[in-house]
Amino acid sequence: QQQVKQSPQSLIVQKGGISIINCAYENTAFDYFPWYQQFPGKGPALLIAIRPDVSEKKEGRFTISFNKSAKQFSLHIMDSQPGDSATYFCAAGPAGGGSNYKLTFGKGTLLTVNP
Amino acid sequence: NAGVMQNPRHLVRRRGQEARLRCSPMKGHSHVYWYRQLPEEGLKFMVYLQKENIIDESGMPKERFSAEFPKEGPSILRIQQVVRGDSAAYFCASSGQSNQPQHFGDGTRLSIL
């Protein structure tokens, strides 16, 4: 059972454009939602994370939008750059007892930003 | 480099052999997590350990897989009698506390011949 569904599987954006990646979850016990960026041959690196008490969080060019009622959250990359080309994973962590262990990951989105 | 260190980066084993994957957490971190990543898949949680204790191993296969995090030294993920299906990238992450962000190493790519 896939608890976090991520789309699209791949995305091509022109330099300067907006990249949007969406995730949906099923388990209402999740209360921590991080996004990770992964380059080939490297481990995932935490980009930005949100908890359900806010609907949006922005850090530089990266914004998470969160819709608790729809159980959806998305990553927006503004002014996308070729250096942003990577695989992006959304994840969700359960509440209680240290909410971000045992993360459940989406399948990833391969983002290509053309110059 | 104060990041999470994993070694080896690449490991090749023949079917039936044992694989040992090592993970040194970030300095000051005492919580370690192991994940497995199959091609074109997201990471799947395997096990969560603190020093000398296994906290949650609900993602570990019941047979052939074991993990430890001794008082001294790195965390070890051990796979006995490897099979082709064990081929994957294995990632370790660490955190200072269980409710703090997890920082990942660059993984060990395990290939089974």
Image (cartoon, coloured by chain):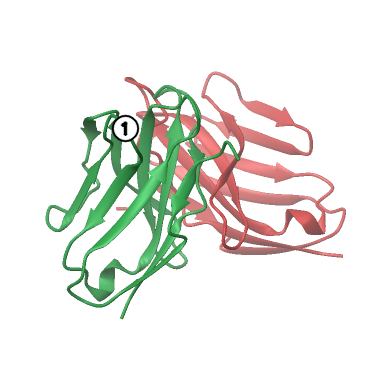
Quarter of the view holding residue B87? bottom left
In the rendered image of this protein, does residue B8 appear above or below residue B58?
A: below
x then y, percent, for residue A28 = 37, 31
Query: On the picture, is B77 further left or further right than B109?
Result: left
Q: Is residue A30 or residue B32 the one in the foreground?
A: B32
Pointer 1 indicates a residue of which chain? B
Choose top left, top right, bottom left or bottom right for residue A73: top right
Q: Residue at x 44, y 40 (%)?
A: B93
In the figure, the red chain has which letter?
A: A
Q: Badge 1 local density, few (<14 within 10 Å), some, or many (20+)?
A: few
* Extreme residue in the front direction: B72
How many numbered circles does the render carry?
1
Front residue of B26/B83: it is: B26
Which residue sits at x=50%, y=43%? B104
Q: Residue furthest left?
A: B63
Is B83 rendered above or below residue B59?
Answer: below
Q: Is residue B21 left or right of residue B79?
A: right
Q: Residue at x 61, y 42 (%)?
A: A74
The vertical placement of B55 against B109, above or below, is: above
**Residue at image coords 47%, 24%:** B28
Chain colored green: B
Secondary structure of the residue carrying numbered label 1? loop
- Please tell me which residue lies in front, A81 or A6: A81
Residue B82 in view here: yes
Q: Is residue A3 visible to the viewer in this orientation of the structure?
A: no
Residue position marked by numbered label 1 in the rendering = B72
Instruction: Give left or right: position of A3 versus B28.
Output: left
Q: Position of residue B113 (x, y in %)?
A: 30, 81
* Image quarter (top left, top right, bottom left or bottom right) of the C terminus of chain A: bottom right
What percent of the width, then of the height, locates residue A32?
47, 29
Give, as a three-letter code, the residue at label 1. Glu
